[in-house]
Image (tube, rainbow, N blue to C red):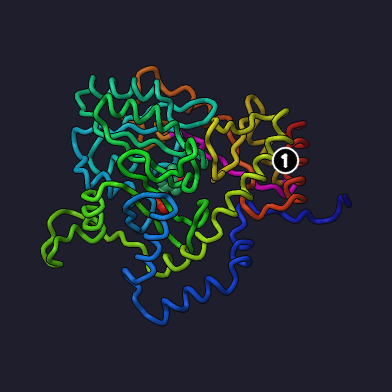
Amino acid sequence: MNQHMPIEPIAFIDIGAQRRRLGARVEDAVARVLTHCQFINGPEVTQFEADLAAFTGARHVVGCASGTDALLMVLMAKGIGRGDAVLCPSFTFCATGEVVALTGATPVFVDVDARTFNIDPASLTRGIATARKLGLEPKAVIPVDLFGQAADHDAVAAIAAAEKLFVLDDAAQGFGATYKGRRLGRFGLATATSFFPAKPLGCYGDGGAIMTDDAELAETLRSVRVHGQGSDKYDNVRLGLTARLDTIQAAVLIEKLKIFEDEIAARNRVAVRYGEALGDVVGVPHVAPGNVSVWAQYTIRLGTVDRDGFAARLKALGVPTAIYYPRSLHQQTAYRGYPVADGGLPVSESLSREVISLPMHAYLDAATQDRVIAAVRSALKG
Ligand SMILES: *Cc1c(COP(=O)(O)O)cnc(C)c1O
């Protein structure tokens, strides 16, 4: 390549490419909402909830304003609060632990598995014991389907059943993924997801949804979503939120869901190619047998390689990277005071030092994949 040619940077996530593919279909969908003007709880919201129920197999779907609200609403509906402990991994996005603390309950952080980066069942068991020793009552566990891969839901379910905890699956990154051939959305009491634009299924703003097979919980969630309203609109029977999914976002999501399966397949082709081309030089993601990931992130492990230098060399070659997550939750200012499982969280801490994520989306063509691969191999040489 001509050394003086400016290097065109590639996109980390190319939302524009998908936008071009969808074209007028999204504009028409939004235009229909602008015509009927039912911006709150319009027909598209009901339609999208039904589409999600069909897609996941869940009996009930409650659309909401964000993934964070989806998690929080379930904890609120279950009456989680002071004195309760909710177990969750430390190596995750802050919202997982934040919603627990917002209810007044105590998040108890547990470690993750070194291969899948998802909740470690042995650390979960230790964390439950830690919570009891501290005089807290363990009530729930929030496994996270990190970077698009399902957590070990059978192992989590077995521990939760033995310890009488309910499971709230944080599928904000894993929506669309399968575990042992079953789509996420029906593991545990409820599944929360996010439609933030950069998530595998994203809208054009904030959005989220909760899936559950529990009719009573679904009804309570619909009340929490609108200030805890009862059957009479002006009799609020519990505390709630303003947490509805906008009709315009639902209209966009209806169109995006139609191409989602195809996009999941495309992301998996990129991941296979990266894995084959990079597996000899860096730690590439391990997908557990029986899992299909949706690749919210393609996150590699650098071991002892200097991460900042590596990222800088990639940037100079036009390849953007991101670090999810440079600090685990128990290492962050807002969460330092909360307990961690006995034995500490050594895997979370080493992942926070060593991981880096590469460009990943459904529209990454073979030539661009080759550029990423070549850049990674060259940047490793220092
Ligand atoms: C993005 C994310 C959330 C929160 O979703 P928002 O829609 O941004 O509120 C929660 N948990 C995880 C693991 C996430 O990645």
On whether residue 120 falls in the magenta region, the answer is no
| Residue 267 x, y percent position in the rendering | 62, 48
In the displayed structure, 183 sits above or below 206; it is: above
Left or right of 176 on screen, residue 64: left
As drawn, is 379 to the left or to the right of 248? right
Assign the magenta stretch its main secondary structure: loop
Percent from the top left, x then y, of residue 372? 72, 44
Q: Nearer the viewer, residue 179 or 146?
A: 179
* Residue that appears at 62% across and 34% down: 300
Q: Nearer the viewer, residue 69 or 48?
A: 48
Region rendered in magenta: 316-328
**Residue 59 screen position, x and y as percent:** 33, 51
Q: Is residue 118 above or below residue 201?
A: above
Q: Residue at position x 21%, y 27% from top? A: 136
Q: Amino acid at mark 1?
A: Arg
Label 1 packing within 10 angstroms: few (<14), some (14-19), many (20+): many
What residue is pinned by disc 1?
313
281 displayed left or right of 21 = right
